[in-house]
Image: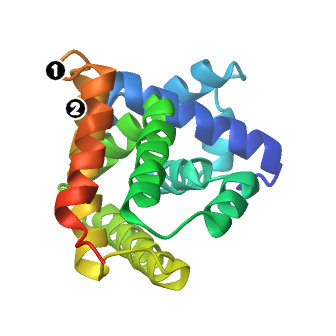
Amino acid sequence: MVRRNEQRRAALVDAAIEVLAREGARGLTFRAVDTEAAVPVGTASNYFGSRDDLLTQAGARVYERLQPDEELIARQRTAGRDREVYAELMRELVGRVAAFRTGYLALLELRLEATRRPGLREVLTERVRADVEANVRHHEEAGLPGDATAVKLLYLALNWLIVEQLTLPDVFDPDERERLVTAAVERIVAAQ
């Protein structure tokens, strides 16, 4: 029987994200999640039908927690539409994603695990594709400079910058990371 207490489920999924980031996919067990969430042993197995279910829900929860808040969205809607403003939006994005270190590391673990689990690969592929399409759509609707290819190239470049920042943080100092984001926008997004 799968339990329905949504607050408890969210706490367990958040605990799974922490375990994934710290121990990797191989370390993600129901018992490890129970321990991380400080709940009685057996609780996670009452909320998730399988380990795959837990992995999938952890991935979805990371995306949920990475969404910008309404204040940021409102500010973006009223911002200018030039490359300088776009570079600032990208710097904010990199900062927001990097601030949720365990979430992003958990996503990396999920991507690696997806190479071995076709069902997880399918779910992540659909989720990432939808995310990229939503970013392109938002970009176009907002009237930001550049085209869909520029959005996708920035997605690829900035994702790797975030990986570098989270896994080897001393490769680039914070000022250089900021300059690299600005340079990526200036070089990838055509001037209008």
Cβ–Cβ under 8 Å for marks 1 and 2: yes
Determine the secondary structure under disc 1.
loop
Circle 1 crowding by C-alpha within 10 Å: few under 14, some 14–19, many from 20:
few
Quadrant of the image for the C terminus?
bottom left
Q: What is the crowding at mark 2: few (fewer than 14 residues within 10 Å), some, or many (at least 20)?
A: some
Residue 105: x and y, percent? Answer: 36, 35
Front in this rendered view, residue 26 or 158: 158
Query: Please, which residue is most extreme toward the front here?
Result: 192
Q: Nearer the viewer, mark 1 or mark 2?
A: 1
Quarter-of-image position of residue 160: top left
Residue holding disc 1: 171
Picture coordinates of residue 121, whole percent (x, y): 28, 65
Image side of residue 17 versus residue 180, left or right: right
Task: Tell me the distance, in whole angstroms, between the alpha carbons under discs 1 and 2.
Answer: 7 Å
Most foreground residue, 62 or 6: 62
Q: Residue at x 28, y 32 (%)?
A: 177
The residue depicted at 49 percent of the width and 44 percent of the height is 92
Quadrant position of residue 78: bottom right
The label number, if any, that marks residue 164 in the structure image = 2
Instruction: Report x, y in % for residue 147.
Output: 30, 81
Q: Amino acid at mark 2?
A: Glu
Q: Residue at x 17, y 59 (%)?
A: 187
Horizontal side of 169 relative to 71 (left or right) equals: left
Most distant residue in the top direction: 170
- Residue 114 numbered tag: none
